[in-house]
Image (cartoon, grey):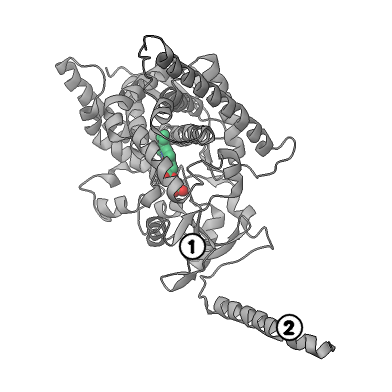
Amino acid sequence: MPDCQHLFLFLPSILSLILFFILIKRKQRRYNLPPGNMGWPFLGETIGYLRPYSATSVGEFMHQHISRYGNIYKSNLFGEKTIVSADAGLNKFILQNEGRLFECNYPRSIGGILGKWSMLVLVGDMHRDMRNISLNFLSNARLRTHLLREVEKHTLLVLTSWKEECVFSAQDEAKKFTFNLMAKNIMSMDPAHPETEQLKKEYVTFMKGVVSAPLNLPGTAYRKALQSRSTILKCIERKMEERIGKMKEGKQNPVPVPVPEEDDLLEWVLNHSNLSAEQILDLILSLLFAGHETSSVAITLAIYFLPASPMVIQQLREEHLEIVRAKKQSGEAELNWDDYKKMEFTQCVINETLRLGNVVRFLHRKALKDVRYKGYDIPCGWKVLPVIAAVHLDPSLFDHPQHFNPWRWQQNNGSHGLTAASNNLMAFGGGSRLCAGTELAKVEMAVFIHHLVLNYQWELADTDEAFAFPFVDFPKGLPIRVFKSLTI
Ligand code: HEM
């Protein structure tokens, strides 16, 4: 066949290819993208975005971007074209349209560490099933009847070990409390038992990897975390096998003996779900992680903010003394749900701690479709970062946002009003992925604060500050010195 005939054969394909690229280019040109800077090739602006800064601010980098481009801007982060949102309305819109217009999209490295069945990376039906299991474990009914008691027991275990005038790390103590609570209620592991202590140590290495650069090279934090992951999984697997063994033992006995059921997550999952062993391991590993890292940081932040506000401590003491007085009259000792519900000012302190401290600063999403918002386009497939911290520190939404002011959460609050403040508090995310442990985290903070303010006065023993790396951490572990309080 002559050459020109070949050309005629391929001409339609070549023309359609050209047409396809023209259409794509035209479509891209049609997008009205928000202003912004795409930074360096591949790296984009990631390094600047992740540079550490004070946790009670949005950081110099983001501050400059918002001043230059406004609350919605484009960038290139984590190797992807990204729309960054510091806009309260857009953040809510993103979270409320999960699965329809946007979808959870954590970096692949997080999945590598937390596991492919971790709830943080799952989407669709599998996410719904895992979420239902977690919600069952953390239900309001279990909180009232069981978890509140557990929270108080583990709080006292930590607080009664504090020695007067000794200096210790408040962050380590808060971690001890939340880790012991989770280990006990997820797998019935006892505090101070060598196995529990070993697991706690592994989690420290594990956590460093979750937040580090995903470089799987010898000696890197990421590689060490992957090794810790497999040690942690072996421990969970051992616990699972022991439990299955016990359950079988009971059934195989000539006269079946009822084996006492453990009231923990592991028992529930083994008896009531169809999850595979691999799925159970990832579920337990990530719940242990989600359940202790965040609330321990929140408690440390409260210990950090409170000494600077003696009036807040005073009002807290009055609220908790009132609860104790009423309990003495009824002859009860343990806190119950009614007592918890009386901790109204404490709830204001909790909200304010979460607003100013921003334990979780931003979330990872991607656009499933082309979306238009306030005249800007968010193209399908782009990464979307709703930055919760930027909303919590926005002076147009919160008066003097850098000021720790729990009274802004009170019913009769002035200027912006409580409803406006509550509508803009997104510390636990929102929509169909709202934190499954929201209420447990609040109970942990409230009960810890209850016993802390009633029993101790404390001061910061060294200068330390909450930094966003972007995970929140105190470089020195927040050293404090405590004195017994004579109020009760
Ligand atoms: C102050 C403490 C806490 C904060 C600030 C916090 C914050 C958050 C946030 C912002 C999310 C949403 C992530 C996203 O949408 O991408 C989340 C999800 C989650 N949190 Fe928490 N959390 C806290 C405590 C807890 C506790 C105590 C538990 C449980 C034991 C827990 C379990 C979970 C789970 C299972 C998810 C995934 C929910 C889902 O994907 O459906 N969290 N948390």
Quadrant in the picture for the N terminus = bottom right
| Residue furthest top in the image | 255
Of callouts 1 and 2, the N-terminal one: 2
Q: Relative to 315, say whether 365 is above or below.
A: below
Q: Which residue is mark 2?
A: 10
Q: Out of 305 and 116, give the one closest to the viewer.
A: 116
Of badges 1 and 2, the one in the foreground is 2
- Element under label 1? loop
Q: Relative to 118, say whether 158 is above or below.
A: above
Q: Which residue is mark 1?
A: 368
Q: Position of residue 172 (x, y in %)?
A: 51, 26
| Residue furthest left in the image | 329
Gap between marks 1 and 2 measured at Cα: 34 Å
Q: Residue at x 41, y 71 (%)?
A: 374
Q: Out of 386 and 455, give the one closest to the viewer.
A: 386
Q: Residue at x 73, y 35 (%)?
A: 219
- Element under label 2? helix
Q: Position of residue 277 (x, y in %)?
A: 52, 32
Q: Quadrant of ligand 1?
A: top left
The reply to whether residue 439 is in sight is yes
Q: Position of residue 103 (x, y in %)?
A: 47, 56
Residue type pointed to by label 1: Leu
The reply to whether residue 430 is in sight is no
Q: Relative to 397, say whether 112 is above or below.
A: above
Decide if residue 158 is on the left or right side of residue 455: right
